[in-house]
Amino acid sequence: MNNPSIFENPCPICKKKEATLLCDYVTEYHSQSIIFVNGPYAAFKAANEGPRLDTCDLPMCEECAKHITDGVDFCPHHYKLHQQVQLPDKLRKYQNRQKQQQRKEMYGTQS
Ligand SMILES: [Zn+2]
Ligand SMILES: [Zn+2]
């Protein structure tokens, strides 16, 4: 008999192995500063310090984890998403062209 409850931390995906990894997919970027209009500067500083992103952190076993690169693994759900986030090559050149144009508009007149 193979009882999954023998693991303290069973993998939620296959429920057969122990979860030893966490999904590293970034679910939220805190790129914008939190602003307190009338707050003291110390409070502003504290709120804007520390790691600026949240990751999925879904526990999973080594077999269910999708290895991306050294120290980075995604859960199957986010791996699928990750693949869709990337534009196919034939569309990416249009994306790059647009980005270059936007950069020129933003910084071009200043220097
Ligand atoms: Zn698993
Ligand atoms: Zn995930």
Image (cartoon, rainbow, N blue to C red):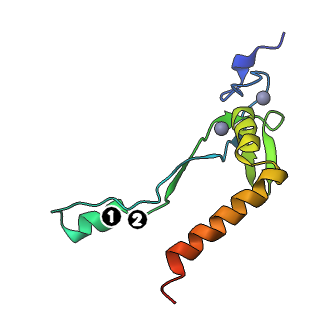
Residue drawn where x is 28% and y is 65% of the image? 44
Q: Separation of disc 1 and disc 2 at Cα?
A: 5 Å
Q: Quadrant of residue 6?
A: top right
> Is 49 situated left or right of 9 in this image?
left
* Number of dots carrying numbers: 2
Tell me if mark 1 has few (under 14), some (14-19) or many (20+) residues whose alpha carbon lies within 10 angstroms of its own: few
**Going by the picture, which residue comes out furthest to the bottom?**
111
Closest to the observer, 87 or 38: 87
Query: Residue 41: x and y, percent?
Result: 23, 70
CB atoms at circles 1 and 2 under 8 Å apart?
A: yes
Residue 4 in the image: above or below residue 9: above
Three-letter code, disc 1: Ala
Tag 1 residue: 46
Secondary structure category for the residue under label 2: loop
> Is 45 situated left or right of 102 in this image?
left
Tag 2 residue: 49
Q: Quadrant of ligand 2?
A: top right
Query: Residue 50: x and y, percent?
Result: 45, 62
Residue drawn where x is 72% and y is 28% of the image? 11
Residue drawn where x is 69% and y is 18% of the image? 5
Three-letter code, disc 2: Glu
Secondary structure category for the residue under label 1: helix
Tell me if mark 2 has few (under 14), some (14-19) or many (20+) residues whose alpha carbon lies within 10 angstroms of its own: few
**Going by the picture, which residue comes out furthest to the left?**
38
